[in-house]
Image: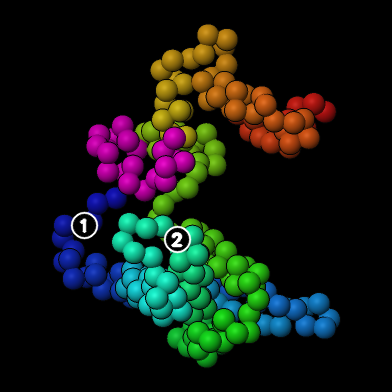
């Protein structure tokens, strides 16, 4: 939907800046003696400025730790790349993990709290929670969950008559859309849709145990069809 031309641009900007930062409340990935999570933590979506700062600090940390072992320009170093990735996770968690009682406050007192007191798996769980929260509230559509949703998008493209709406689709969702549209133009000679044929081809080499429970192109699982 296009902005109302009668509304001043500054009003739209005020609305944008007044919207709270998207966030989710999750269990902290450590349990007490009774097997219950020790507390909750708020996971907040990052801004572009925060992401840039996290990237810059991660590289600083990697260079400081490696000192004279930094790879030269054009050289590849698996250790250097992994170190930057690990440092990047810490930088991101330092920014996105917020206090459960006041999201304005950070959950961790310092980055050192993360590196010295959390296990690798705990950091991995928190980072996964951040990635899922960002995907949940982000504008990018990662996949279409139903034929009706695909149909609505095809209609949107037809009405818009330009490529702009495609900017909201991930590469995977774009593939789904193209395959669905192609199957309408060129049905399979066997009578099944092109989408169904592609799915059958891609799963034909999988073991039977793996195929059980996988959805077919009509949305019904193999196990359901066989019962």
How is the protein colored in the picture? rainbow
Task: State the image coordinates of residue 125 (x, y, percent, origin top left).
Answer: 62, 68
* Nearer to me, 171 or 145: 171
Q: Is 63 drawn above or below residue 227 in the view shown?
A: below
For the C terminus, give its image quadrant.
top right
The residue wearing badge 2 is 77
* Disc 1 crowd, CA 10 A, few/some/many (<14, 14-19, 20+): few
Task: State the image coordinates of residue 147 (x, y, percent, origin top left).
Answer: 52, 34
Task: State the image coordinates of residue 13 (x, y, percent, origin top left).
Answer: 24, 70
The residue wearing badge 1 is 4
Q: How many marks?
A: 2
Q: Which segment is the magenta one?
A: 156-175
Q: Quadrant of residue 27?
A: bottom right
Q: Is residue 115 left or right of residue 172?
A: right
Q: Is 155 drawn above or below residue 120 in the view shown?
A: above
- Can residue 221 be seen at all in this image of the molecule? no
Q: Residue furthest bottom?
A: 109
Q: Quadrant of residue 108?
A: bottom right
Q: Quadrant of residue 218?
A: top right
Secondary element at image label 1: loop
Q: Residue at x 42, y 72 (%)?
A: 69
Mark closest to the chain's N terminus, 2 or 1: 1
Q: Main secondary structure of the magenta part?
A: helix
Q: Residue at x 64, y 28 (%)?
A: 203
């Amino acid at each position: 939907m296009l902005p109302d031309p009668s509304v001043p641009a500054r009003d739209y900007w005020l609305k944008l800046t007044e919207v709270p930062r998207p966030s989710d409340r999750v269990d902290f990935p450590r349990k007490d003696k009774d097997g219950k999570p020790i507390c909750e933590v708020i996971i907040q979506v990052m801004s572009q400025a925060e992401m840039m700062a996290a990237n810059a600090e991660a590289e600083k940390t990697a260079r400081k730790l490696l000192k004279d072992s930094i790879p030269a320009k054009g050289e590849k170093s698996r250790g250097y790349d992994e170190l930057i990735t690990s440092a990047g996770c810490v930088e991101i968690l330092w920014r996105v993990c917020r206090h459960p009682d006041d999201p304005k406050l950070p959950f961790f007192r310092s980055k050192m709290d993360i590196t010295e007191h959390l296990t690798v798996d705990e950091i991995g769980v928190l980072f996964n929670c951040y990635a899922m929260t960002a995907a949940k509230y982000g504008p990018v559509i990662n996949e279409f969950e139903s034929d009706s949703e695909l149909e609505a998008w095809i209609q949107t493209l037809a009405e818009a008559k330009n490529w702009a709406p495609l900017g909201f689709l991930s590469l995977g969702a774009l593939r789904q859309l193209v395959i669905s549209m192609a199957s309408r133009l060129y049905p399979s000679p066997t009578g099944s849709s092109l989408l169904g044929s592609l799915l059958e081809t891609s799963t034909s080499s999988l073991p039977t145990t793996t195929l059980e429970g996988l959805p077919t192109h009509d949305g019904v699982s193999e196990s359901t069809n066989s019962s």
